[in-house]
């Protein structure tokens, strides 16, 4: 049964995180392979997920002390101006992230499913679907993620199992991965791809069973990382490093090469791609939800539907301004990865240290 208490369960939180991450990251990370080998990318994934796990522990620790709103928490400690500035950083991060995932959705849909269609049309439809899913009640996003979760994850598992039979062992060499500056850079990029975990600080008041928040978030992180890591390994075994570098969307190409035994579901690639793209609707709903939530905390506005509509209009305008996925990806890497996420991470760590020191002294 679904509750109607303006809160999401920890199970829904895990599924929201996986649905938010898996589509975006599975299409983003393989594009980093142009800078190095596949083995280096796997090492970067392991290191990046490790960093993210540590950071997740810090975020969830801090979230225990946020009872009403993160903006209010910051304002009590740093003042109104600092709270506004930090909320603006989070809002900008989510806006750029939404532009990127929307443009990826439009590009993949046009290239593999509807080549005669303008790329802007699926982008706008995705934002409209996300807008509806992000409206009150707040648990609507959780309900949608809970329903879609098995329809995306189970076909993914089937795909990986079938695709693994086509792996060619000669593509795997016995050379070890290189731990160098490029690997460290890619590890940081993996961490930033999971940067949305910081936004749990804003959603903390709406999550049931706060004591299970850390375990649930780490479980979602591991599910996503294992799935993406397996897809990259199978992609390397199917196409080789050079083949992966030559492909625009290696994961999608991997799906199109899957041969279902007995000739059943010959267009399994399109079926699965459609299911994978459903995760983008959940990600869009998360994006618009946070844009609206953070906007209200920035300007201390009450719950009004026209603010929600304003976020949709701004998102559509941003997507139309960001004309293609290449521009969106460059914007994501430059603004989010190298500017906004480091700011978010630094302040989160500082607040967590201050809370820990405060609790230590009070004992």
Image (cartoon, rainbow, N blue to C red):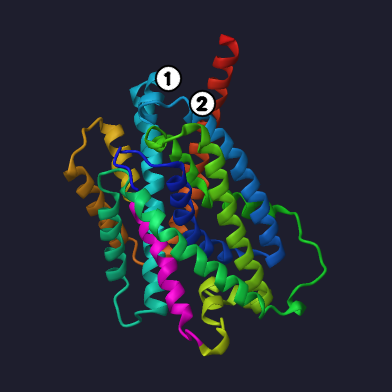
- Numbered disc 2: secondary structure: helix
Q: Residue furthest front?
A: 1
Q: Quadrant of residue 33?
A: bottom right
Locate residue 32, reporting x and y percent.
59, 63
Q: Which residue is mark 2?
A: 351
Most common secondary structure along the magenta stretch: helix
Q: Are marks 2 and 1 in contact (CB under 8 Å)?
A: yes
Q: Residue at x 21, y 33 (%)?
A: 302
Could you classify mark 1 by the number of other residues whose Cα lies within 10 Å: few (under 14), some (14-19), or many (20 or more)?
A: few
Q: Residue furthest right?
A: 174
Residue 293 lies, with reference to residue 260, above or below; the image says above
Q: Which residue is mark 1?
A: 77
Locate residue 86, reporting x and y percent.
40, 33
Left or right? Give the position of 315 relative to 210: left
Q: Quadrant of residue 215?
A: top right
Residue 1 lies, with reference to residue 262, above or below; the image says above
Q: Residue at x 59, y 11 (%)?
A: 361
308, 333: nearer the viewer: 308
Locate residue 181, reporting x and y percent.
70, 53
Q: Which residues are magenta?
A: 264-285
Residue 283 in sight from this viewpoint: no
């Amino acid at each position: 049964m679904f509750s109607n208490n303006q809160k999401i369960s920890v199970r829904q939180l895990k599924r929201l995180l996986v649905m938010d991450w898996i589509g975006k990251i599975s299409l983003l990370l393989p594009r980093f392979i142009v800078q190095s080998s596949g083995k280096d990318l796997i090492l970067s994934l392991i290191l990046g997920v490790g960093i993210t796990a540590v950071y997740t522990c810090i975020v969830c620790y801090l979230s225990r002390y946020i009872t009403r709103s993160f903006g209010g928490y910051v304002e009590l400690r740093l003042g109104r101006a600092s709270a506004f500035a930090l909320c603006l950083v989070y809002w900008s991060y989510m806006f750029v992230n939404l532009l990127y995932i929307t443009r990826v959705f439009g590009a993949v849909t046009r290239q593999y499913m509807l080549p005669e269609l303008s790329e802007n049309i699926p982008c706008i439809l995705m934002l409209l679907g996300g807008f509806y899913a992000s409206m009150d009640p707040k648990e609507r996003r959780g309900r949608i993620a809970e329903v879609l979760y098995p329809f995306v994850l189970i076909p993914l598992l089937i795909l990986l199992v079938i695709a693994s039979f086509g792996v060619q062992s000669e593509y795997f060499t016995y050379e070890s991965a290189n731990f160098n500056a490029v690997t460290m850079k890619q590890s940081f990029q993996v961490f930033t791809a999971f940067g949305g975990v910081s936004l749990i600080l804003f959603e903390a008041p709406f999550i049931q069973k706060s004591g299970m928040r850390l375990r649930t978030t780490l479980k979602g992180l591991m599910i996503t990382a294992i799935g993406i890591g397996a897809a990259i390994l199978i992609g390397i075994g199917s196409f080789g490093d050079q083949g992966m570098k030559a492909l625009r969307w290696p994961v999608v190409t991997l799906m199109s090469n899957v041969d279902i035994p007995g000739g059943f579901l010959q267009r399994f690639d399109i079926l699965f791609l459609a299911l994978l793209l459903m995760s983008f609707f959940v990600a869009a709903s998360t994006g618009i939800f946070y844009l609206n939530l953070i906007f209200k905390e920035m300007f201390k506005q009450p719950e009004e539907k026209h603010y929600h509509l304003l976020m949709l209009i701004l998102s559509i305008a941003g997507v139309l301004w960001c004309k293609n996925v290449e521009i969106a990806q460059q914007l994501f890497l430059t603004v989010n990865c190298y500017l906004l996420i480091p700011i978010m991470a630094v302040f989160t760590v500082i607040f967590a240290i201050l809370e820990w020191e405060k609790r230590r002294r009070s004992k």
